[in-house]
Image (spheres, rainbow, N blue to C red):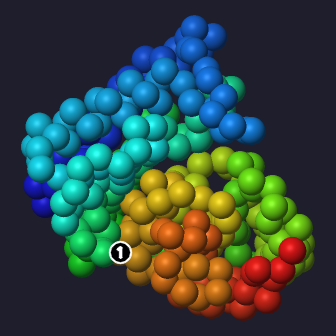
Amino acid sequence: MHPMLTTAVKAARRAGSIINRASRDIDMVSVTRKRHNDFVTEVDKGAERAIIEVLHRAYPDHAILAEESGAQGRSEYTWIIDPLDGTTNFIHGFPQYAVSIAVRHKDLIAHGVIYDPCKNELFTASRGRGAFVNDRRVRVSKEAHLRDSLIGTGFPFRDFTGLDEYMAMLREVIAKTAGVRHAGAAALDLAYVAAGRLDGFWEIGLLPWDMAAGALLVQEAGGLVAGLSGESDYLESGRIIGGNPKIFAQLLQTIAPHAGKV
């Protein structure tokens, strides 16, 4: 395992311990509303501090881009951190949330970790070295037909200006697949695509820390990721589609005609 990936794993597990301790008594957790349907807890903040502490101890000169504390420093290496993806799930005791950590070298995501503290599942990937779940190599699914596929998604929740656009996509995908699932944690949805549990995934309105590690996992598991029109700037646009190669192509063909239409 690459030393940066080892450091990311250590940081993710440290954050996971903080999250698990807090989950035993959710009613005692302080919750603040950042904006409509966007919450932050003292657990998010504590987990993020723990992650940054581990990363800075190993790589003090690297830059940070974190959900709660924002951008820090300048370097050709940037750590992209979501200390608790699925905060709303966590607040409600719904066990679908994760820690997501990626490191970007210049313009490419080099390493990624997604840790599910509820199931103790650790998803890891390094560019060119494959994707793993708890040290077991994984591949995207072999499903060839959209009509038989299980697709993950996330509903718009921060900004509803694209809701009509999204609903047109959702209507089309529901009609053309075996099922659509919304679990509320984009990082885990992408990890599930990498592990073959979902055949594809799409969402709009995301931020870089929601996608960075998961996108690398999908790619290293043999899948494809892109923006909703097939472009490669999903980290900037916040609009992503991923899947095994055959489902990716069919899902993109289904969604693309509705992208940008309100």
Would you place residue 200 above or below residue 88 in this image?
below
Q: Which residue does the numbered mark 1 point to in the structure image?
A: 220
Q: Of 44 and 252, which appears nearest the observer?
A: 44
Q: Of 39 and 154, which appears nearest the observer?
A: 39
Residue 1 visible at all: no
Position in image of residue 81 (x %, y %)? 38, 48
Residue 131 visible at all: yes
* 85 sits to left or right of 249: left
Q: Of 247 and 100, which appears nearest the observer?
A: 100
Q: Residue furthest top?
A: 28
* 239 sits to left or right of 168: left
The total of numbered circles placed on residues is 1
When asked about the image quadrant of residue 166, the answer is bottom right
Q: Inspect the image, locate mark 1, and give the three-letter code of the amino acid beneath it.
A: Glu
Position in image of residue 110 (x %, y %)? 26, 68
In which quadrant will I find the C terminus? bottom right
In which quadrant will I find the N terminus? bottom left
Q: Residue at x 74, y 38 (%)?
A: 36
Would you place residue 15 above or below residue 31 in this image?
below
Position in image of residue 159 (x %, y %)? 74, 54
How crowded is the residue under tag 1: few (<14 C-alpha within 10 Å), some, or many (20+)? many
* 76 sits to left or right of 44: left
Q: Residue at x 29, y 30 (%)?
A: 50
Q: Residue at x 17, y 52 (%)?
A: 62
When asked about the image quadrant of residue 74, the answer is bottom left
Would you place residue 247 above or below residue 69 in this image?
below
Position in image of residue 146 (x %, y %)? 73, 83
Q: Residue at x 57, y 30 (%)?
A: 40
- Callout 1 secondary element: helix
Would you place residue 77 above or below residue 54 in this image?
below
